[in-house]
């Protein structure tokens, strides 16, 4: 049986995790983040959200080390829970990897415009990245590193440019609501915006033979800290260059508009939009990698159609899963925001469910001392993350749109799971799937 290629090093794992975490949401929803919390409320909400994820990141580091399986959460859960629970966990994690990729309106769907450039860009980018990932993980990893460090450089440049044209008076008021409520409203969306560190486990089987086990934890924790610093820099920069209340949600890119008005120059818009384009490629590529590996490994465990477990004999990539992800992504591009907006809203809950399942699995492994505390902490934190979105009387809870999106995703998952092999594969065999050993 052909195994996946083993090429990845520490910098590749960091670039992948950061790529999944930081897409273009910082550009599109910054007005919403500041309206939720104000500058200080947003900064504290992100800090609290990221820091309380550190124990969960630690748990993931241990799980990836013990179970280097591309199925990630589905593999961890499979050791202690029935296959149906394993599938549900993996399917919710797959939802969190669905990402949004507008000037000329093409048509409207559900009252939302779908723009021609959006569709053309999305389709071409989908085709290119599907081909790239089909060819091999090494090419994808090179692109991931190049886009990640280019993006970080561009962010530093536009943040420094704004630093000389802003004012501290723009930061007031520091909170959009009462302080605790402001922090809570921002904290609610942190799981979606800071998720991505768990994607390290999806490519655990592709680690270079020289890769040390401990570096899984290093890559995960580095991703969390880097994501936190990035969001704090962007929140501070946007709030400093213009009064945050002036950011208008009816404009497509309020962050770029704020910088243009502060600097009275259009070049800053070109720089920020260039950063967004690099971030889009970075996030798109990273999500194709993570989601295709997840589908491949779930299929290998007989949780999905067996065809998706095929490994290309020459490229050593999960070729069928990559193509399926490409086709599914291309299809969602035509839906525009009509379906993607509610899907993104439930993203925070879907990733919290997957994190909870991973922490529960680690707790069942009976770790001792602080490791057990980390697992319990992860269970508590993820339970709160889920409750604040589903309990009706908590501000920011699900509306019927989000419940409908979640129901549709569940029905779609049930239909796809029905295509798996009908014969039962022994659990012992599933737990010892053909995973190349790590050093």
Image (spheres, rainbow, N blue to C red):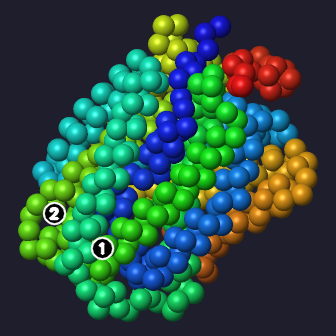
Label tally: 2
Query: Is label 1 in a helix, a strand or a loop?
Result: helix
Q: Are marks 2 and 1 in contact (CB under 8 Å)?
A: no
On the image, the x and y values in percent for residue 314 come to 48, 7
On the image, the x and y values in percent for residue 67 come to 75, 33
Q: Residue at x 39, y 68 (%)?
A: 233
* Rendered view: 89 above or below 395: above
Residue 422: name its quadrant.
top right
Query: Is label 2 in a helix, a strand or a loop?
Result: helix
* Rendered view: 136 above or below 224: above
The residue that label 1 is drawn on is 238
Q: Residue at x 84, y 25 (%)?
A: 427
Residue 32: name its quadrant.
bottom left
The residue that label 2 is drawn on is 268
Q: Residue at x 24, y 78 (%)?
A: 241
- Per the model, the C-alpha gap separating discs 2 and 1 is 13 Å
- Front residue of this view, candidates 179 and 370: 370
Q: Is residue 245 visible?
A: no
């Amino acid at each position: 049986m052909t195994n996946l290629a083993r090429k990845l090093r520490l910098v590749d794992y960091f670039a992948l995790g950061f790529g999944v975490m930081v897409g273009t949401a910082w550009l599109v929803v910054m007005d919403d983040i500041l309206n939720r919390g104000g500058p200080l409320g947003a900064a504290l909400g992100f800090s609290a959200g990221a820091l309380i994820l550190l124990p969960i990141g630690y748990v993931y580091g241990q799980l990836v080390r013990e179970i280097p399986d591309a199925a990630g959460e589905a593999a961890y859960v499979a050791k202690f829970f029935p296959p149906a629970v394993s599938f549900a966990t993996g399917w919710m994690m797959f939802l969190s990897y669905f990402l949004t990729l507008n000037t000329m309106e093409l048509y409207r769907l559900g009252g939302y415009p779908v723009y021609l450039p959006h569709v053309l860009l999305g389709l071409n980018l989908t085709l290119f990245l599907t081909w790239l990932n089909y060819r091999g993980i090494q090419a994808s990893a090179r692109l991931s590193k190049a886009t990640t460090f280019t993006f970080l450089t561009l962010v530093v440049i536009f943040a420094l440019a704004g630093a000389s044209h802003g004012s501290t008076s723009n930061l007031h008021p520091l909170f959009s609501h009462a302080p605790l409520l402001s922090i809570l409203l921002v904290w609610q969306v942190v799981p979606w915006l800071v998720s991505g560190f768990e994607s390290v486990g999806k490519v655990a089987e592709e680690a270079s033979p020289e890769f040390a086990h401990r570096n899984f934890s290093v890559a995960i924790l580095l991703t969390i800290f880097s994501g936190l610093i990035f969001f704090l820099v962007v929140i501070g920069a946007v709030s400093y260059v213009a009064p945050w209340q002036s950011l208008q949600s009816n404009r497509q890119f309020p962050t770029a508009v704020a910088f243009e008005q502060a600097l009275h120059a259009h070049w800053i818009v070109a720089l920020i939009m260039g950063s967004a384009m690099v971030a889009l490629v970075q996030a798109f590529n990273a999500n194709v990698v993570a989601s295709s590996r997840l589908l491949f490994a779930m299929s290998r465990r007989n949780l999905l159609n067996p065809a998706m477990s095929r490994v290309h004999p020459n490229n050593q990539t999960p070729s069928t899963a990559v193509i399926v992800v490409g086709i599914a992504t291309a299809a969602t591009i035509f839906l525009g925001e009509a379906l993607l907006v509610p899907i993104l809203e439930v993203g925070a809950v879907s990733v919290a469910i997957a994190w909870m399942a991973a922490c529960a699995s680690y707790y069942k492994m009976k770790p001792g001392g602080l490791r057990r505390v980390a697992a319990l902490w992860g269970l508590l934190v993820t339970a709160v993350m889920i409750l604040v979105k589903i309990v009706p009387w908590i501000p920011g809870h699900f509306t019927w749109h989000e419940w409908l999106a979640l129901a549709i995703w569940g029905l779609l998952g049930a239909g796809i799971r029905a295509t798996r092999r009908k014969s039962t594969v022994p659990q012992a065999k599933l737990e010892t799937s053909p995973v190349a050993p790590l050093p």
